Amino acid sequence: MDQHPLVVFTPSGKRGRFAPGTPVLTAARQLGVDLDSVCGGRGICSKCQVSPAYGDFPKHGVTVHDTALSPWNAVEARYDEKRGLKSGRRLGCQALIQGDVVIDVPPESQVHRQVVRKAATDRTIAMDPATRLYFVTVDEPDMHAPEGDVERLRSALDRQWQVTGATADTALLARLQGVLRKGAWQVTVAVFDDHTGAPPRILDIWPGLHEGGLYGLAIDLGSTTIAAHLTDLATGAVVASSGLMNPQIRFGEDLMSRVSYAMMNPGGETEMTRAVRDALNDLARTIAAEAHIDPRLIMETVFVCNPVMHHLLLGFDPVELGQAPFALVTSDALSLPARDLELSAINPCARTYILPCIAGHVGADAAAVALSEEPHKSPDLVLVVDVGTNAEILLGNTTRVLACSSPTGPAFEGAQISSGQRAAPGAIERIEIAPATKTPRFRVIGCDLWSDDPGFAEATATTGVTGICGSGIIEAVAEMRMAGLLDPSGLIGSAAQTGTDRCEPDGRTHAYLIHDGSADNGPRITVTQSDIRAIQLAKSALYAGARLLMDEMGVDTVDRVVLAGAFGAHISPKHAMVLGMIPDAPLDKVVSAGNAAGTGARIALCNRAARAEIEQVVRHITKVETAIEPRFQEHFVAANAIPHATASFPELSKHVTLPQVGFNAGSDREGRRRRRRG
Amino acid sequence: MDQHPLVVFTPSGKRGRFAPGTPVLTAARQLGVDLDSVCGGRGICSKCQVSPAYGDFPKHGVTVHDTALSPWNAVEARYDEKRGLKSGRRLGCQALIQGDVVIDVPPESQVHRQVVRKAATDRTIAMDPATRLYFVTVDEPDMHAPEGDVERLRSALDRQWQVTGATADTALLARLQGVLRKGAWQVTVAVFDDHTGAPPRILDIWPGLHEGGLYGLAIDLGSTTIAAHLTDLATGAVVASSGLMNPQIRFGEDLMSRVSYAMMNPGGETEMTRAVRDALNDLARTIAAEAHIDPRLIMETVFVCNPVMHHLLLGFDPVELGQAPFALVTSDALSLPARDLELSAINPCARTYILPCIAGHVGADAAAVALSEEPHKSPDLVLVVDVGTNAEILLGNTTRVLACSSPTGPAFEGAQISSGQRAAPGAIERIEIAPATKTPRFRVIGCDLWSDDPGFAEATATTGVTGICGSGIIEAVAEMRMAGLLDPSGLIGSAAQTGTDRCEPDGRTHAYLIHDGSADNGPRITVTQSDIRAIQLAKSALYAGARLLMDEMGVDTVDRVVLAGAFGAHISPKHAMVLGMIPDAPLDKVVSAGNAAGTGARIALCNRAARAEIEQVVRHITKVETAIEPRFQEHFVAANAIPHATASFPELSKHVTLPQVGFNAGSDREGRRRRRRG
């Protein structure tokens, strides 16, 4: 008896023998090869494209003849004519196996394709979305077996796709009969199944084959800004990103002032909930328009946010979060209809997933950072700092993970800084101050030239130089210290003390002039004493939170530091360390991870197993409450000084010349260390 | 070693030995005795009252001394003082076992108590509601184990009541923190669990012990009327009943005219949905006010209705139900939030259950009749006829059950009858016509006297005699036939033919005068020829449906007939048979079951297992579609005549004198039978 042809799939290497005449798609399914198909092999969707290879394959032990697959057929010809099929491609549902063959599944034909993150750490996201499309052929109604239309649709999903017991909203059912008849009993349904044991849910239905795709929104709902990534749920591609200011700012800049607003104003929390939900609907409409998609194709939203924003999004009064014991209404992850949050701009059956909160002060944003940066999988002891209006801080390794939140305030985001502004074209983002001349040079967002490069003025003519953004102010303060313009306590020296007229009198203190645009009606950009104080408070809070976790862990150093946050990617590790924002670590072990919370949201959006994973991980994170921990105050006070680089930072000394003595007797790094151990 | 005391519970007979000091409630729980408790043994709710018995009990083999239980304690004394405890009663959670004892659990202390139906058949409903109250003590928040409030509530429900994984709407969660703190961490929660595999759902929460009870609405949503029973979910007692006209009547009297309205008017189905939902909210408010309860204590609604009303309630366009193959949007039972039906008058988290539809023309009302009358459990072949604007007809026994629906029109409900009216005080409901004198006597609703009894005029002075209700018109037509006023074809004879001036000329036909109230400004109540025709059409449709099922079953007679329907209880079996509404059956085997559909709704409301049962039963009912069955038309035409009783009805001949010959040569029962078999 003849042996059946051998079929080898690449890149998986899965192989098996199949009777001649077996479609490639059928063989792939039987072997568990990851080959996509929406229409289930009907030659409609073209998702199952494969690339057969011909010739000798000694590695696989086969020789592939050009008769290995059935000839190109009418279905493929029609598809090629209408849409174009890449050279060498076949439709897996049409090509029949006739002889030994090696078949490559290109990435775009894989359901569980890997999406490479654009961030520095280069992590990949495995696609396994909760919402998928299924093309089904539904039995026509039969008077003698009078099941309803949805029951026959349900049977078809079960038989044709092994999707069992799917349910649907009554509002969707109201459209069902029309769609089934318009599609002549062939329809595409979007089914949500998050593998939590709840029955699969039909979110939408289209007559015939739906080719418009499905989308999700990964939303980082911050105190100050709301950022969203519109993501293709089949490919994981971010098709548009957009952000806006959190409109709750008018009720209070920081979280505690919003909690106070809710306490002082009856119905205040409802007002704030209304404001953020309206903003989210605006954002959804804007981002859909930007990507030229119908916002009703947005089937899922995933939120990461701090506990106060979490409660205000959900319509919960945040007042308990303003006082010990900081009781959350709910700490677990939530999976609920998006309409419960009045997200009316997107699909009316869309779903929302909100990551779990770790504690009353450590929210779903910290959980998202943990999902993205995976400290629980790190063999090294890693400190992850997500810098925002609140800093989320994680410290841990495979053995144990600790978390806390620290109220840094908005200074790191350029707020409460005299010349501060949001990161936008025209904002100063990089600064160097020559220690000898005390003269600054800088770069602004939107221009690659330094301010002392030829052509800078022309290149920045449209944007101008408008202010300093968060990463710019950090560099400015660190550079001022390294140039000897600040003493270790943070005091700006006078022109006489520093030897530069740029240190101008400013009331009873001094300010340092970075850029004078007044001749062209532009701003005079200075760093004032109160700017320095705001940064000192913020960095002390951040440093104290990290130290508190290190105390709890019983360590004095960490192996790696990851700087995250909406602007974390832009912070210069060197300057952060000079400033004393973060504990000592080898400079090459300090990396930026970009918006780790936003990335965590994208991971949870694209991969339902990641949701289960972070829910599990969060249960094992030890929470440390900064607000009631006396040592936090001690660390905070001790961290106020701005250290200067010493021999313990050889990397820094390569780049900068360090003044050895300040102009008054503030505390220095060594002094602080002694106190900390005392 | 001493043997532990023996405890015997009655009426269950469950027994066991328990260590001295064991509370009676604990013993009952360990033995699986059905003893209620909301507070879980905290001496708060008083639901666990028991009656210990003292003396010799040879049957149980024990002698009970008056020291068998611990003495009356302070908790019981306080409860007795505040609320009163019936003589001999103890609180099961307070009384401790000290010696052999016999303890009776009175019906009101049983969770699964039996509720006796008031209807003729005397069926009982076992209480097993989906929504129950639980009193719980919730752990206070702890900063070092920062679970949310709802997670701690969930743990408490699990630990204290074995209610696992309860979820809640975000709107309820928004109130949670306030209630927990107001109740000092002791709260009562209403939990819905219908045992379908979905997680239990918290529907409401109250600080401390909630003593206001929980209620449900069993709703029979008919084409013409909407009837609701407000039911105590703990006891099963109907605390109020109310009804109103279906406001959709303005869009069409019968179902098909409403389907036409939806077809002809874009958005017409939305208008009708709006109308019925508004009416349901009105009804809920009215019935709650009548029972002096807060409508927010209504936690569940159960609906029974025909397929068109089913679709219009759910917001589905009924147009497919107007044409073969009569495809339902959904045939399965539905369990959904009541707010999906915009039932805003009741608890915002309330649940709705809608019984399954059997087919496109055989609705959830027929399923409810099956649940109430249980033809599938009958050893005899039983015909169940639910009379309304549509008649639901079931025929079957333990082997097989058939079902169909027949479009009788509203004549049986007194509509489309010249002097017809709804069943209300003043309506004629019973009529007798003396065959010799052709003189009628009658009774009206609200008065026990016959019209020829002394004092009738005085007794009906306030209501008057206003018209004829459905059961009255059936009796009138049957009596007219038996008195020789009608020939077998249904023609009313002239005064000359019948020998009575009450047969008055009425255009080209005649009318029979039943009551002349014109002297007192009251109506002249007559039965006209077109009234007779309307009744003939209705009864022919009913009879033809029943015959169709009998054909399908291959039988020519049935063992029993059950007349059901909102007015089914009032139909006289004798007159129904004279009229030819129902097939021949021994008169003593024809019983009225009252509003069986409404009873089915109450059963499903009070017992979640009944929901699973009817969903199962419906799958095994064979559906017969009258609308496309040619034999239905044949039966319908053949059934038009009004037979008179013959020797085959000996029971009738005891009561009535039968004229043997009509005044023209219409068909008679024998003639009809011959045609049917031909």
Image: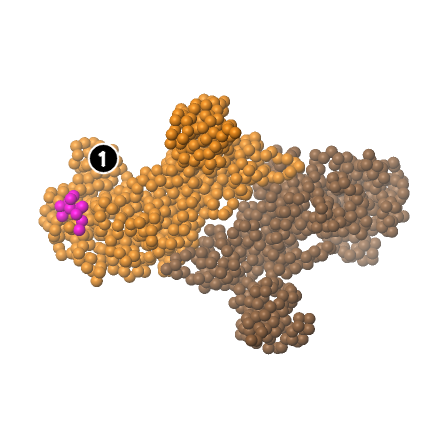
Chain colours: A brown, B orange
Quadrant assignment, res A449 = bottom right
Q: Which residue is painted at 28% across and 44% down in the image?
A: B592
Image location (x, y in percent) of residue B377: 34, 48
Identity of the amino acid at label 1?
Asp
Start and end of the magenta stretch?
B648-658
What is the chain identity of the residue bearing mark 1?
A: B
Image location (x, y in percent) of residue A646: 87, 45
Residue B655 visible within the image: yes
> Which quadrant of the figure contains the C terminus of chain B?
bottom left
The front one of A168 and B494 is: A168
Residue A106 visible within the image: no
B650 part of magenta stretch: yes
Q: Which residue is painted at 42% across and 62% down in the image?
A: A140
Per the image, the residue denoted by label 1 is B448
Q: Is residue B317 above or below residue B458?
A: below
Q: Secondary structure at mark 1?
A: loop
Quadrant assignment, res A511 = top right
The front one of B488 and B404 is: B404
The front one of B3 and A582 is: B3
